[in-house]
Amino acid sequence: MPLKKNEIALFKKRLIDLRIRINQTVKGATKEVTELDQSKGYSQHQADEGTDDFVKNINLEVSSKEMNVLRQIDRALEKIEDGTYGVCDLTGDEIPFKRLDAIPYATMTVKAQEQFEKGAIQ
């Protein structure tokens, strides 16, 4: 059953709120990486530099994952604007409400997502 206008409006609000939170997280991680780069060379011990590098790598990895989610959120918001939110990008099937409720930026059904990740669908 297609989503109702009020349901779409709630998903849009959730997506925008999530986008704001993730942007703040990415900005914080970016700031930490920048600060670590600026303080590099001031450590008195090689172990300190190793710890700094480890923290930097973790922050960069988190930022990369968050940026991927941001792209998915932007795609979901585009789908809301063009009236295709809740419809699988790959199959055209309806995405179940429970999936959208759990992952509001989902643009594929679970089956299509699995096939896509296996490389069976592109």
Image: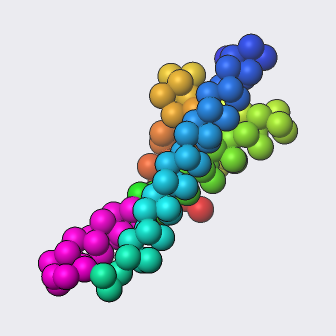
Where residue 78 appears, x then y in whole percent?
Answer: 77, 43
Name the dominant secondary structure of the magenta segment. helix
- The quarter of the image holding the C terminus is bottom right
Answer above or below: position of 30 versus 39: above
Residue 44 position by quadrant: bottom left
Where residue 26 appears, x then y in whole percent?
Answer: 52, 54
Where residue 59 appears, x then y in whole percent?
Answer: 39, 62
Tell me what residue is drawn at x 77 percent, y 34 percent.
80
Tell me what residue is drawn at x 35 percent, y 81 percent.
40
Whether residue 43 sits left or right of residue 63 in the image: it is left
- Residue at the right extreme of this rendering: 82
Answer above or below: position of 9 versus 65: above
- The quarter of the image holding the N terminus is top right
Answer above or below: position of 74 versus 34: above
The segment highlighted magenta reads 43-60
Residue 11 position by quadrant: top right
Residue 36 visible from this viewpoint: yes
Question: Relative to the observer, which residue lies in front, 2 or 65?
Answer: 65
